[in-house]
Image (cartoon, rainbow, N blue to C red):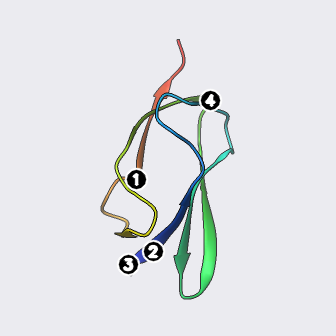
Amino acid sequence: MPRKLIKIDVSEKEEVRKNQTLVVVEAMKMENEIKSTIDGYVKKIFVSAGDLVDSEKPLIELGIKE
């Protein structure tokens, strides 16, 4: 089921914490927060607000802090 990307809460090269909200997507009139699973940083953002996305397309690539 396609979802609409509502908001991106991070930017490239920004440090993120585990459980920090990265993006908000809407499906069936419900907003869902996608959260970081690691402490790290944002390597690359592949989407923009307003894009239609699905589970096959990566949204954000995270890197591990060294």
| Image location (x, y in percent) of residue 15 | 60, 28
Q: Nearer the viewer, mark 4 or mark 2?
A: 2
Q: CA distance from mark 1 to mark 4?
A: 17 Å
Q: Amino acid at mark 3?
A: Pro
Residue lying furthest top in this view?
Answer: 66
Pointer 3 or 1: first along the chain: 3
- Which residue bears the numbered disc 4? 39
Q: Is residue 12 left or right of residue 26?
A: left
First in sequence: mark 1 vs mark 4: 4
Which residue lies at the image location 50% right of the left edge and 23% below the top edge?
A: 64
Residue that numbered label 1 is attached to: 59
SS label for mark 1: loop
**To which residue does mark 2 refer?**
4
Q: Secondary structure at mark 3?
A: loop
Nearer to the camera, 47 or 38: 47
SS category of the residue bearing label 2: strand
Give the spatial CA distance, label 4 vs label 3.
28 Å
Quick check: marks 3 and 2 in contact, CB under 8 Å?
yes
Q: Amino acid at mark 1?
A: Leu
Q: Residue at x 37, y 65 (%)?
A: 55
**Three-letter amino acid code at the position of disc 4:** Asp
Above or below for 43 versus 24: above
Give the residue at mark 3. Answer: 2
Percent of width and height locating residue 6? 53, 68
